[in-house]
Amino acid sequence: MNFQDLLLIKHELLLTIAALIILCFEIFSTDKNKGMVVPLSAISLAFIAAVSFYFPSEGTAFGGMFQTDGLRTAVKLILDIATIIIILQSYGWVTKEDNKNKISEFYIILFSTLIGMNFMISSGDFLMLYLGLELATIPIATLAAFDRYKTKSAEAGIKLILSSALSTGILLYGLSMIYATTGSIYFEEVRAAFQPSPLAVLGMIFFITGMGFKLSLVPFHLWAADVYEGSPIAVTSYLSVVSKGAAAFIFTYVLYTVFSVASEIWLQVIVLLSIVTMTIGNLFAMRQKNMKRFLAFSSIAQAGFLLLGILGQGSLGMGTVIFFLLVYVFTNLAAFSVVATISDKTGKENIDDYNGLYKTNPKLSLVLMLSLFSLAGIPPVAGFFGKLFLFNAMASKGYFIVLFIALINATISLYYYLLPIRAMFIMKNENPIDTFKSNVYIKIGLTVSVAGIFLTGIISMIYEYLISVSVGL
Amino acid sequence: MNILNLLVIIPVLTVTGIAFTKNMDNVKKVAALGMFLQLITAVIVMFTYITIRKSGVTDEMVLISDYTWFTSINIHYTIGIDGISAAMILLTAIVVFAGIFASWEVKNLPKEFFISLILLATGVFGFFISIDLFTMFLYYEIAVIPMYLLIGIWGSGPKEYSAMKLTLMLMGGSAMLIVALFGIYYLKGSGDGQYTFNLLELAKNNMSIEAQRFFFPFAFIGFGVLGALFPFHTWSPDGHASAPTAVSMLHAGVLMKLGGYGIFRVAMYLMPDAAVEQAWIFIILTSISVIYGAFGAIWQKDLKYINAYSSVSHCGLVIFGLLMMNKTAMDGAILQMISHGLMTALFFALIGMIYSRTHTRLINEMGGLMKVIPFLGVVYLIAGLASLGLPGLSGFVAEMAIFVGAFQHDDMFHRVATIMAISAIVVTAVYILRVVGILLLGPIKNNDYLALKDATWYEKLSTLTLLVSVAAIGVYPHWLYDLIYESIAPIASKLVSI
């Protein structure tokens, strides 16, 4: 190991340093300035993101376990942006009385899961993938149980850790089968040696199952709604955006490279999974009354849409999936931030509570409307482009019937995305949620998200960039 | 800079202006000013087009500007117009302008109302100037979604239900369109090696008949939903009845024409072989639309429902004319789009004005209105006569051309369909005259109505703008005919069998 290797993992190293800095800050902080950890972590993360984006590195380290290139740098940047928004959005919640004594811990744990995700994204073999996945998952369970006075939060933590344990077990079992048939765990070697023998294919299916848990694909989604509802909203949004994003990337990457020989087989699995996921996610989302559960099921349905992009294959498929992730980051986090603010100020989380919100809090209502339109795929906001490019990717391979099913689902999803909009703008309410002022961090987070929702689609450079870095898959 | 860009820029600027207007009374003035400028631009666009044509240019589309947007999928922002779109742009500008004045008295959230209304109009204008299918679709969806808020917030009656139904059905239609869009892109768009969404280039390429057979129904029904094609018309009566006045005007007047325009310009133009082959199915459906709409209107008691069903019938006639695969009938269909757009907008404007006075739309509760509000009454009568196709007004010219063209087919199927469609005209006369008889003539049933005031200046402005346009087409249809007939030819040449 030499200095060059260290440069390659600079993003992960810097994140570790940042976590340590927060730890030191915790030691020297007083009760009064504890809240300052929020800007501290947001700024340091922004700095890290900027550094690793402006000085990108390319190459492999640790004998092929770790690899990085433009594509991975782009994905890491997207996750960094998402985490920054989540940090800003969490301010109102962490500074509450219950959490005051453990503010810094939240951010340290958040950073360590992010480090796990980064290692997972950059993995060059299955071992690193597994290590990164575990480093990412176990701290999240702590975060999910962070509201320890709420039983629902504790329940979410235990559900998350148990279901991840199960899914990781399945994943490892699958990896061992792949190792048994190919004799290697390195992506390149497995790719060369992979033959679609029954055992190897079973290993691949187990891998898909394990990742399906992380992505909350139907039928592996049963943990999602309860965990999403029980966790603090900052954790929910982290789970549904960052965690899912990292898993989606590495899932797509492994399918495209390692299992490229067996593409005939996994394409069928993906088609099936995406149809079921979209449909079930939609059907359940329609009936939800709680905004958090509503967004949970909507993000299950969105994961189904995401799989459609994988059908595109090659650089078109990868670029489109990452673009959708970016759009999804801004869109979903805007929605979650509004829900978080309202929940922090009033404790209300049901769709009915939002009745008449536009009269009292017009700006928040407009942001939520915008993000719901973006989730539903209405132009000219980013969600429209994200979805249409997914459809384009799959249509390029001739999946027109699946496309039609996906579009029917998109129309169904419009129905439930309109429900909160109906509540906010159309329904009358005797005593709506009072007018309130949100704190400055939430405002910054929302501004970033709204700018992202408006600009990511219209500015074609972003999509072109993501396609260009995915070339060669 | 291309003048067509102004057609999108002016509404966007108007929306921005409204958003920054502090005084609620000034909101409508800003909106009116913006849409007045838009109307002038539309007129200039039309004359520019005529001048270019007179100078001997025979290109299919003129005033083309092309900006590359997404290079990797070859999406461009390409704009340009031909005679049909120039006419449709003028129609839209007139209807929106009249619509602003028809909603002069909006009290509830006026800012949001005018912003949504003009956003909707932006989508329509953008749709008509697009040559690239992707941007065309983008604008199409922009035009649909503000409807939900417009009906939901400012509507009347079962507005939430109607708004949801309308939005979901139209979005369902656009879902089918996306399938067709990508089908065309991947199976027709690769003429010179690179895929394209450009309409003019697509038209030059070939598409296998099997692919056309599969994708034509998607494109046709996708647009047909918006054109109130039976059995996908059910959003129309509920939606129109619940919508506020200006929205009904814009929706029935312009948005439903997007359907006809799209069918002609996208579905039939790009997949002509399948269009000829499958026309019979859709001729049956449109014939049902025409008759069903007319009979539906007879049974209604609510003025808006009457007009909504009559719109189903008349828009059915548009698609019917297009499907006749005959140049004369197609000319008539395009004329009908414009003529019906103006007429129905006028109707909805008048209904809104009458409702704001009598607070009821049920015709049985009203009577003798001609005596108390003579101006509105006379305009209503003229609009009614135009609707039933009285010579000298716009409806006659359009319907005549459609039927003359349709009757040139000498086989049994087309003859029967034509005769059935013509019989709807008689039914139209019945329901129009029935309304005129009960509503305007006859005794005054309610003494409160004696105190009603006749039209105010903005109502007169709104109705007269539309009325003059209707009369202008009826008395001298040639100016409109000259505008459109050259542009219909290249599309018709791919389709016409006789």
Image: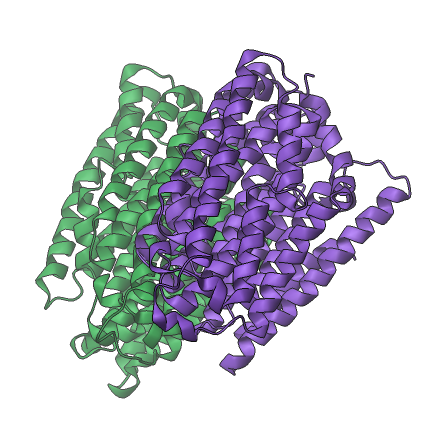
Colour assignment, chain B: purple
Dividing the image into 4 quarters, which one contains the C terminus of chain B? top right
Is residue A121 shown to the viewer in this render?
no
The quadrant holding residue B359 is bottom left
Question: Residue shown at 58%/26% (left/top)?
Answer: B323
Left or right side of A432 for A323 = right
Give percent across and percent down for residue A168: 22, 39
Residue A274, given in percent of the width and then of the height, sits at: 34, 34
Q: From the viewer's perspective, is residue A37 above or below residue B416? A: below
Q: Which colouring convention does the figure follow?
A: by chain
Considering only vertical position in the picture, is B95 above or below A428?
A: above
Which of the pair B44/A53 is nearer the observer? Answer: B44
x and y percentages locating residue B282 in the rendered image:
50, 24
Q: Nearer the viewer, residue A7 or B332?
A: B332
Residue A157, picture quadrant? bottom left
Q: Residue at x 59, y 24 (%)?
A: B187
Note whether residue B231 is visible. yes
Give the farthest residue toward the front. Answer: B443
- State which quarter of the image contains the N terminus of chain B: bottom right
Q: Name the outermost residue toward the right.
A: B55
Figure chain in green: A
Determine the residue positioned at 24% across, 59% down.
A291
Viewer-side residue, B86 vs A262: B86
- Expressed as whole percent of the image width and height from the top left, the position of residue B228 reads 46, 38
Q: Residue at x 28, y 43 (%)?
A: A282
Left/right of residue B51 with respect to residue B294 in the rendered view: right
Residue extending farthest to the top is B411
**Circle count:** 0
Q: Is residue A8 left or right of residue A165?
A: right
Residue A337 position (above or below residue A99): above
